[in-house]
Image (cartoon, rainbow, N blue to C red):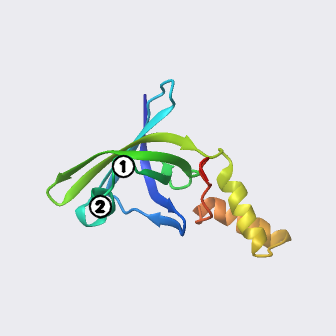
Amino acid sequence: MKTFKLADFQLIGEDGLTPVPFEDGLAINQENEENTWLIEIFLKKTDAERFRLADKDEIFRVQAIITKRENDPAYFSVKLVSYTEMDDFVTVLFRGKLSGSRNYYAVSLLECLLNQNLQGEELLEAFKEGMKKKLAVRAPRSEED
């Protein structure tokens, strides 16, 4: 197994990305035959209501940035494994698999910038800035979509 610090975590919905504010988080590659990942987030109870009400069979599509905010997002399809309350905080554990290609973010960012009719040097500078800041772009569709 390999464990990584979670730098950012967002839910992917039909309306785009929804940030999930969290205090701390881990992404664990179980390195098994099923390519399973575990994602655990530690958050305030006030930010966890969406998960408290979730059905254990509900599939969440999420975007996570691992280790450093400068890294490309990784896309996962996950299910809730556990929801544990501790005073004013909650830990939420998910299990799932990576989805989407490794270079998806760069392609989506470029597509977004081209749709803004950027060209030449302006396009190049906007692309560099987007890659550096990891601007929000359209999330990948799951295989079911």
Farthest residue, direction right: 120
Real-space Cα separation, disc 1 to disc 2, in angstroms: 14 Å
Q: Is residue 126 left or right of residue 144?
A: right
As helix, strand or loop, the secondary structure at mark 1 comes to: strand
* Residue lying at 23% horizontally and 62% vertically, measured from the top left: 45
* Residue lying at 65% horizontally and 59% vertically, measured from the top left: 131
As helix, strand or loop, the secondary structure at mark 2 comes to: loop
The image quadrant of residue 107 is: bottom right
Nearest-to-viewer mark from 1 and 2 = 2
Q: Is residue 135 left or right of residue 120?
A: left
Task: Identify the residue under disc 2.
Answer: 48
| Residue in front for this viewpoint, 58 or 83 | 58
Task: Identify the residue under disc 1.
Answer: 25
The first of marks 1 and 2 along the sequence is: 1
**Residue kind at label 1, given as amino acid type:** Gly
* Residue lying at 50% horizontally and 52% vertically, measured from the top left: 65
| Residue in front for this viewpoint, 119 or 55 | 55
**Residue kind at label 2, given as amino acid type:** Ala
Query: Is residue 103 depicted above or below 44 in this figure?
Result: above
